Amino acid sequence: MTVIEELARRYVQADLAGTKIPLAELETDSLVPADFEAAMAVQRTFTGLAGKPVKGWKLAIRPDGQAVGAPMLDCHRTDDDNVAVFPKGGTEGIEVEICFTLASDIPAAGGISFSRADLIRHIDKVHLGAELLRYRLVEKNQVPFPLFLADRLANHGFIVGPEVDHGILEAFSGDETGLPHLTVTERSVNVFDAAARHPNGDPLAPLVAFANAPINKGDLLKAGQVVTTGSLCGVIPGTLADDTHVALKSAGAFTLSGLKPQASSPADDA
C-alpha cells in the first residue's frame, strides 16, 4: 500500500468511526503529504474508497494567492418547504455560503485564461447554501496545509438551499455598502446577525483562480456539480442538534437540522 493509499484509508476509517487522527501519528508514519498534488491524490483515493460520487467542489484561495479545492461527497438539497435534514452525525461547524451549480464541464485552461465572464457562462443556478464541517484531525486545521487539504478542507457535507437571483453575485463583488444582511438562528438565539461578507469579496473569485490554476486538469469541475467558494459568516460552531434557520435578507431563507433521535416505543423497551 502506498503512502497516499494509507493516508486515504485512515481518513476513511476516521470518517466512518467518528474519530480523529493525531498529527504526531501521521508524522511518525511519514504520511504527511509533501505538496498539493499529493494531497489531491489522497482526496481522489479517499473518494474511491468511500464509494461515493463527487457531488461538488469546495474552492478557496490561500493567502499566498494559490487556488485549492476539495471534493464534496455528501450534498443534499432543501425540500419544497426550504427545510433540510443532514443524515450524518458528527457536524462540528456550519458556514453559510453562496453556491452555484454548473451547467457544463469546465475544461483545463491550457494556453488560454478564463475570465469571470467566461465562467459565468458555465453556471446554471445560484443558491444559498450551508457547508457542514468535521475535522478528521485532532489539530483540526493547525497542521501542514497539504495534510489539511488531504482532509478535504474539513468538508463533512453540504446543503443546497433555495435558488437566488444571479444578481447576488454582483452584490458581493461590488463595494461593501450594499452587502445583504445575514441572520443565523439556533432555536431562538441569534448566532450570527450582521452583513454577509465573502472572504474574497467576489464569490466567483475562487472559481476563476481554480479554473486557471495548473491543478485544474479539466477532469474535476463537471456539469451538475455544486461549487461553493467561501463562508459569508466565518465558522459557526454547531452540531445540528437543534434546528438552524438561515436568512439572507432579500435573497432567501432555509432551515436545516441533523437527524433527531428516535423516541423508543414500549415494544422497543420490552
Image (cartoon, rainbow, N blue to C red):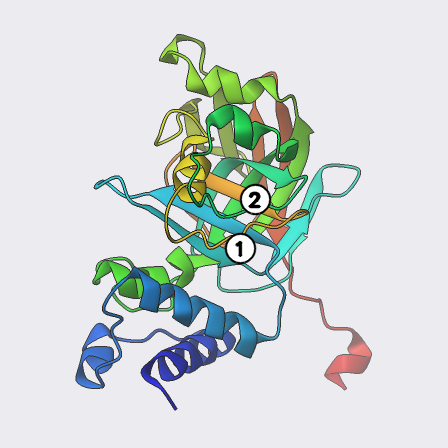
Image quadrant assignment for residue 32: bottom left
For residue 163, say whether it is visible: yes
As drawn, 188 above or below 168:
below
**Residue 223 or 63: which is nearer the viewer?**
223
Residue 95 position within the rendered picture, expressed as x and y whole percent measured from the top left: 45, 42
Dot 1 alpha-carbon crowd within 10 angstroms: few under 14, some 14 to 19, many 20 or more: many
- The residue to which callout 2 is attached is 106
Horizontal and vertical percent for residue 235? 38, 43
Work out whether 203 lies above or below 255: above
Image vertical order of residue 116 relative to residue 130, above or below: above
Judge from the rendering whether residue 32 lies leftward or rightward of residue 188; answer left or right: left
Residue at label 1?
A: 220
| Quadrant position of the N terminus in the picture | bottom left
The answer to whether residue 241 is visible is no
C-alpha gap between disc 1 and disc 2: 8 Å
Amino acid type, mark 1: Leu
First along the sequence among labels 1 and 2: 2
Find out whether the residues at labels 1 and 2 contact each other: C-beta distance under 8 Å: yes
Q: Residue at position x 45%, y 10% from top?
A: 178
- Residue drawn at 27 percent across, 71 percent down: 33
Q: Secondary structure at mark 1?
A: loop
Kind of residue indicated by mark 2:
Ile
Residue 167: x and y, percent? 59, 17
10 Å neighbourhood of mark 2: few (<14), some, or many (≥20)? many
Helix, strand or loop at disc 2?
A: loop
Number of on-image labels: 2
Residue 201 position within the rendered picture, expressed as x and y whole percent measured from the top left: 37, 25
Residue 256 or residue 36, whichever sits in front = 36
Q: As rendered, which of 50 and 134 lies closer to the eye?
A: 50
User: Up-down: is 16 above or below 65?
Assistant: below
Image quadrant holding the C terminus, namely bottom right
Residue at 35 percent across and 73 percent down: it is: 20
